[in-house]
Amino acid sequence: MTKMVFILLDGLRHGTARDCLGYMEGLVAAGEAQVYEVRSELPSISRPLYETLMSGLPPVVHGVTSNAVVRRSKVRNVFSLATEAGLATAAAAYHWYFELYNQAPFSPEFRHVEDFPGDIRHGSFYWADPYPDDHLFADADVLIRRHDPDFLLLHPMNIDDAGHRYGGASREYRNAARNAGDLLARYLPQWRQAGYAVLVTSDHGMSDDGSHGGPHETETHVPLYTVGADVFTLAPDAKPAQTDIAGLACAVLGIADHGLPVPEGVLRSEGRGHGRA
């Protein structure tokens, strides 16, 4: 198995990622990462797609079809499968993740948890969309240093927040993406050195008028970067679906018989055996 950091840059459309995530594009140019264009499932809104990214199921199947559906997940997902496999899980994420994979509703008393009796064992959760991305990356780094999780989800919100405030074609939106790119440049080298494969994607995009939910390409076309070619890679012509990403994560984590879809054209090596046996 190989440890993984799963980074969900909320609300980042594909074209903006390619234009603004300089460090990630540098990794791609150096052959140390791959990038793909993925189309999000519908509706292209947050909570339904959080569940899709973790379960490999579209919203119409897993049942979380609206942001107003507040309940714990009822389907197999990366967190539950990792927990069943005896792996350590963690998240620095929006509080909707706590509600999906630990318990609902969320309460501020669960801002920080350790050894929580849910599928996210260790976590730092926030509920204000402008919560600074640099604070959240630091929260994630603390979780890694304290708990050495096998699977960690990092979910910052500033790109999505800027998009809703100023629109997906705005300078503010692009600058929020550039800031996230700089944070990736600061933290990914040390996480890679610590033995983590890294996956960077988004749930949905952002329209020019500052919203999302429908099928337009600005709202549904998102990036998928994979970092750790010694552990996992996709064929150059692969066209992964958003419903493939959970299965890809499980494959990297070494979870056997996970039953989730995996992209066609996956080329996977044995990796370096980091993490728990």
Image (tube, rainbow, N blue to C red):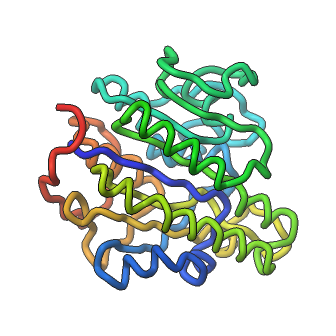
Residue 36 occupies quadrant: bottom left
Q: Is residue 275 above or below residue 166?
A: above
Residue drawn at (66%, 55%), measured in percent from left and top? 133
Residue 199 occupies quadrant: bottom left
Residue drawn at (48%, 75%), measured in percent from left and top? 23
Residue closest to the far top: 117
* 73 horizontally vs 270: left or right: right
Pick the residue in front: 46 or 143: 143
- Across and down, in percent, residue 73 comes to 56, 28
Residue 238 occupies quadrant: bottom left
- Across and down, in percent, residue 60 comes to 59, 44
- From the image, which quarter does the C terminus lie in? top left
Q: Is residue 27 above or below residue 226?
A: below
Residue drawn at (29%, 79%), measured in percent from left and top? 31
Residue closest to the far left: 270
Is residue 121 in view? yes
* 160 horizontally vs 253: left or right: right
- Across and down, in percent, residue 205 comes to 66, 66
- From the image, which quarter does the N terminus lie in? top left
| Badge count | 0
Pick the residue in front: 272 or 237: 272
Pick the residue in front: 94 or 60: 94
* 173 horizontally vs 6: left or right: right
Is residue 261 in view? no
- Across and down, in percent, residue 213 comes to 74, 59
Residue drawn at (48%, 36%), measured in percent from left and top? 143
